[in-house]
Image (spheres, grey):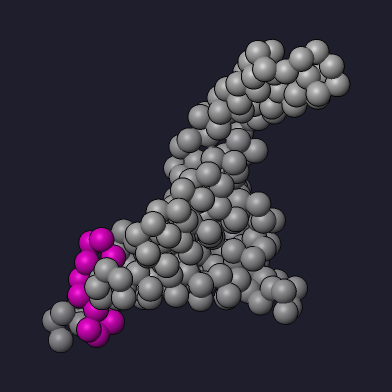
């Protein structure tokens, strides 16, 4: 399913949590969090909507490798005498430079997400916020997994909701775990409606649960996604309005 459809379903799910769950205050930030969470499982795909947004540092990654190559070459020229060690360092400098020049698209974005995630981990450790470090770990590792593998499981959903629970304890933001967990789960439910399905219980079971209504990327599939989003939105709107009137 397309990222825009996942986002729409996540936001609608956030509205459902805000309007239908007793004790949960209506929160635009919570609805936005549900939308963000609905995109999180696709961090395992370097071309996903969220990967592109969080991988904003990708160009800096390429130049960092080039700068590293120049720094190593300068150190080698100025500090090392001609010989085997100098040749080794020049080889390392050349390797860094070629990596920097050769990094393109998905590979660069993966490294950018790795650095972004690790920076978030460090920020969490510095501020003693465990939820922030767990979030950073997720962002750092997810791009290096196979698409629709471990980020598309019930265990990853539970982890995401647990991160929200820890954030709730630290920030006092009531209902954050529900917004986060429901938004994340909405992605898996939506992907279950595609022909590829979702292996909810990896690694315990490789079985792919699917209700093959959508052929992702096709014209008919796009129309079906729009219809599902519209129908889901009308359903939630009707339930919320009915609850308010009641």
Residue at 72% over, 74% down: 203
Q: Residue furthest left?
A: 245
> Count of labels shown?
0
| Residue 241 percent coordinates (x, y) | 20, 75
Residue 242 visible in the snapshot: yes
**Residue 5: horizontal and vertical position, in percent?**
45, 55
Q: Which quadrant would the N terminus be assigned to in this image?
A: bottom right
- Rendered position, 55 above or below 225: above
Q: Note whether 132 is above or below 75 in the view shown.
A: below
Residue drawn 22% across and 84% down? 23
From the viewer's perspective, tell me whether residue 233 is left or right of residue 56.
left
Decide whether the magenta segment is chiefly helix, strand or loop. Answer: loop
The quarter of the rendered structure image containing the C terminus is bottom left
Q: Is residue 48 magenta?
A: no
Specify the quadrant of the image occupied by residue 77.
Answer: top right
- In percent of width and height, residue 86 lies at 78, 19
Seen in the image, is 179 located left or right of residue 106? Answer: left
Residue positioned 31% across, 75% down in the render: 169
In the image, residue 51 sits, relative to residue 186, either above or below, namely above
Determine whether, in the image, residue 212 is placed left or right of residue 51. right
Does 57 sit above or below residue 113?
above
Point out residue 20 in the picture as x, y percentages from the top left corner: 27, 80
Front-most of residues 61 and 8: 61
Determine if residue 211 is in view: no
Please give the name of the residue rendered at 64% of the width and 66% of the height, measured from the top-left corner.
Answer: 150
What is the span of residues highlighted in magenta in the rendered image? 20-30
């Amino acid at each position: 399913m397309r990222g825009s459809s996942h986002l729409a379903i996540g936001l609608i799910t956030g509205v459902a949590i805000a309007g239908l769950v007793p004790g949960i205050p209506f929160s635009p930030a919570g609805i936005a969090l549900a939308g963000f969470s609905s995109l999180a499982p696709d961090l395992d795909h370097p071309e996903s909507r969220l990967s592109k947004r969080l991988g904003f540092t990708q160009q800096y990654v390429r130049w960092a490798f080039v700068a590293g190559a120049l720094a190593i070459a300068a150190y080698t020229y100025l500090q090392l005498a001609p010989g085997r060690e100098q040749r080794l360092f020049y080889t390392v400098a050349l390797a860094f430079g070629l990596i920097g020049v050769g990094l393109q698209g998905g590979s660069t974005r993966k490294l950018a997400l790795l650095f972004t995630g690790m920076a978030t981990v460090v920020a969490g450790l510095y501020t003693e916020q465990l939820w922030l470090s767990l979030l950073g770990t997720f962002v750092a590792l997810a791009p290096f997994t196979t698409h629709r593998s471990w980020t598309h499981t019930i265990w990853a959903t539970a982890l995401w909701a647990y991160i929200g629970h820890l954030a709730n304890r630290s920030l006092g933001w009531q209902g954050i775990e529900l917004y986060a967990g429901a938004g994340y789960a909405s992605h898996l439910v939506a992907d279950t409606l595609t022909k590829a399905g979702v292996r909810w219980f990896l690694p315990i079971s490789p079985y792919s649960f699917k209700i093959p209504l959508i052929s992702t990327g096709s014209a008919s599939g796009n129309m079906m996604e729009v219809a599902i989003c519209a129908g889901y939105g009308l359903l939630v709107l009707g339930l919320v309005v009915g609850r308010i009137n009641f």
